[in-house]
C-alpha cells in the first residue's frame, strides 16, 4: 500500500489507516478541483465569450450565451458543495472497494470523481447531448482509472501534497 509501519512491514500487513486517510484526502482533493472547475467554467461562460466574440457570434459558434447569471458566492459555494459531496461519497467508495472487490480504493475514487467532474463540465455546455456527455465522461473516467491503477503512489502523493494549496486558493 502506501505507508508501511514497522509492525506492518514485519507482519506483512498493509497500514489500513493510512490507506483510508490517503483515499479520503484524494477524494477531498478531487472535490475541490471539481468545484474550482465549475467556477472556472462559469467564469468563462460569463466573461470569456464576450471578450472575443460578439454575443450573437458566441451563441452561434459555441451555443453559450454571454449572459450567465452567477452570484459572487459561487467562488466559495461550488468548491464547498463539491467537497461536501466528495467527503460523503468517499467512505462509501472505500467500503465497496474493500468489501466487494477486495482492492485498493484509490483507483475507484479516481474513477468516480473523474466521472462526476467531467460530467459536471460537460453538462454546462448545452449543445452537447446528454448521452454524449455521459459517454465522454465515462471514457475519461475509465482512462483515469487505468492510469491510477498503475500509478497509485503518484496519485496518493498528488492528493496529499496539493490539497492544502488548493484549499488556500478556494478560501481566498
Image (cartoon, rainbow, N blue to C red):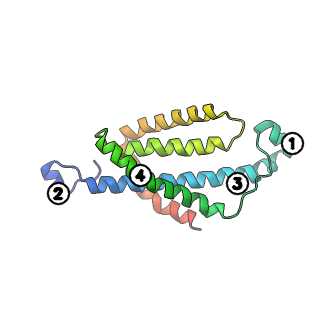
Q: Secondary structure at mark 3?
A: helix
Mark 1 / mark 3, whichever is N-terminal:
3
Discs 2, 4 touching: Cβ within 8 Å: no
Which residue is the site of mark 2? 6
Pointer 3 with pointer 2, Cβ within 8 A: no
Q: CA distance from mark 1 to mark 2?
A: 65 Å
Which residue is denoted by mark 4 in the rendering? 90
Q: Quadrant of residue 133?
A: top right
Residue shown at 64%/55% (left/top)?
A: 39
Residue bearing the label numbered 1 = 56
- Residue wearing tag 3: 43
Residue 158 seen in render: no
Going from the N terminus, do you reach mark 3 or mark 2 first?
Answer: 2
Q: Is residue 123 above or below residue 132?
A: below
Q: Secondary structure at mark 4?
A: helix
The percent coordinates of residue 27 (x first, y second) are 44, 52
For this view, does 49 lie left or right of residue 158?
right
Label 3 CA crowd tier, 10 Å (few <14, some 14–19, many 20+): some
Label 4 crowd (10 A; few <14 / some 14-19 / many >=20)? many
From mark 4 to mark 1, how far is it between C-alphas?
43 Å
- Mark 2 vs mark 4, foreground winner is 4
Distance of label 3 from label 4 (alpha carbons): 28 Å
Q: Residue at x 68, y 35 (%)?
A: 128
Front in this rendered view, residue 112 or 166: 112
Side of 85 where 152 appears, left or right: left
Q: Nearer the viewer, residue 87 or 118?
A: 87
Labels 1 and 2: the sequence-earlier one: 2
- Nearest-to-viewer mark from 3 and 2: 3
- CB atoms of marks 3 and 4 within 8 Å: no
Give the mark nearest the N terminus, 3 or 4. Answer: 3
User: For the residue carrying disc 2, how many other residues have a C-alpha within 10 Å: few (<14), some (14-19), or many (20+)?
Assistant: few
Report the side of 55 relative to 105 (left or right). Answer: right
Amino acid at each position: 500500500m502506501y505507508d508501511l509501519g514497522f509492525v506492518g512491514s514485519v507482519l506483512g500487513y498493509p497500514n489500513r489507516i493510512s490507506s483510508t486517510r490517503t483515499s479520503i484526502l484524494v477524494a477531498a482533493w478531487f472535490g475541490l478541483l471539481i468545484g474550482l472547475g465549475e467556477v472556472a467554467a462559469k467564469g468563462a461562460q460569463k466573461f470569456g465569450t464576450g471578450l472575443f466574440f460578439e454575443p450573437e457570434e458566441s451563441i452561434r459558434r459555441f451555443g453559450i450565451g454571454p449572459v450567465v447569471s452567477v452570484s459572487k458566492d459561487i467562488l466559495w459555494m461550488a468548491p464547498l458543495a463539491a467537497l461536501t459531496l466528495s467527503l460523503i461519497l468517499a467512505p462509501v467508495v472505500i467500503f465497496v472497494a474493500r468489501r466487494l472487490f477486495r482492492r485498493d480504493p484509490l483507483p475507484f475514487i479516481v474513477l468516480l470523481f473523474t466521472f462526476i467532474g467531467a460530467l459536471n463540465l460537460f453538462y454546462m455546455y448545452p449543445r452537447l447531448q446528454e448521452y454524449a456527455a455521459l459517454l465522454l465522461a465515462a471514457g475519461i473516467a475509465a482512462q483515469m482509472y487505468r492510469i491510477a491503477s498503475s500509478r497509485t503512489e503518484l496519485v496518493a502523493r498528488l492528493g496529499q501534497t496539493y490539497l492544502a494549496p488548493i484549499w488556500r486558493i478556494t478560501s481566498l
